[in-house]
Amino acid sequence: MRIYFAGSIRGEAPDRDWFQELIGHISQTDKVLTEHSFDFSYDDEIKKDDWEIWETDIKWLRSADAVIGEVTAPSLGVGYEIGKAEEWGKPILLLYRESPGKRTSAMLNGSNFNELFTYNEKNEALRAIDGFLTRVRAERPDP
């Protein structure tokens, strides 16, 4: 399957090592369309043309079979991507690492169009991804 992975880049500081670990895990069974997006330096990222980023990401998002987002770090862009994926009927898994005194957005918590998984340990998130991808594969019409 083609998976669109979303995570904060310009919003709150991204956890690039964790994002790479998640992408590597997903890549064992599926194609991550955004795999290169999290192998960057912030200085290089802010030099990119915003229109080109939007156009590329929207094409990837539209072609994805499912979306997995790491939403621990707030990001307007990730929220936008989740909204578009929801509008287009994409299966969505959102991962949130529990943080004392913080909660995810009510718009994410309240939505019936995504699966929000709260985790403490990384292996919990990896198991949630595996279960989500198994369900998406089972629900997909034969390609």
Image (tube, rainbow, N blue to C red):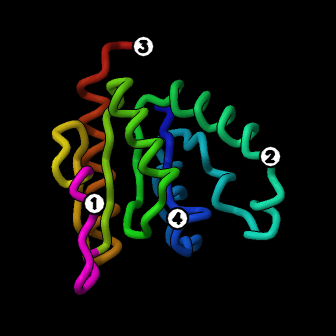
Chain-order first, disc 4 or disc 3? 4
The amino acid on which the numbered mark 1 sits, given as a three-letter code, is: Ser
Distance between mark 4 and mark 3 Cα atoms = 28 Å
**Sequence order check: which comes first, mark 2 or mark 1?**
2
Query: Residue at position x 27%, y 65% from top?
Result: 104
Asked if labels 4 and 2 touch by Cβ distance under 8 angstroms, the answer is no
Whether residue 28 is visible: yes
For the residues labelled 3 and 2, the Cα–Cα distance comes to 35 Å
Task: Tell which circle, 1 or 3, labels the residue nearer the N-terminal end.
Answer: 1
Q: CA distance from mark 1 to mark 3?
A: 35 Å
- What SS does tag 4 mark? helix
Label of residue 143 in the image: 3
| Amino acid under disc 2 | Asp
Q: In the figure, is residue 60 to the left or right of 41?
A: left
Q: Nearer the viewer, residue 101 or 29?
A: 101
Q: Nearer the viewer, mark 1 or mark 4?
A: 1
Query: Residue 40, how many percent across, how many down?
Result: 73, 64
Residue position for label 2: 49
Tag 2, which secondary structure?
loop
Amino acid at the residue labelled 4: Phe
Location of mark 4 (residue)? 19
Is there CB contact under 8 Å for labels 3 and 2? no
Instruction: Judge from the rendering whether residue 122 lies leftward or rightward of residue 27; answer left or right.
Output: left
Distance (Cα) linking label 1 and label 4 = 20 Å
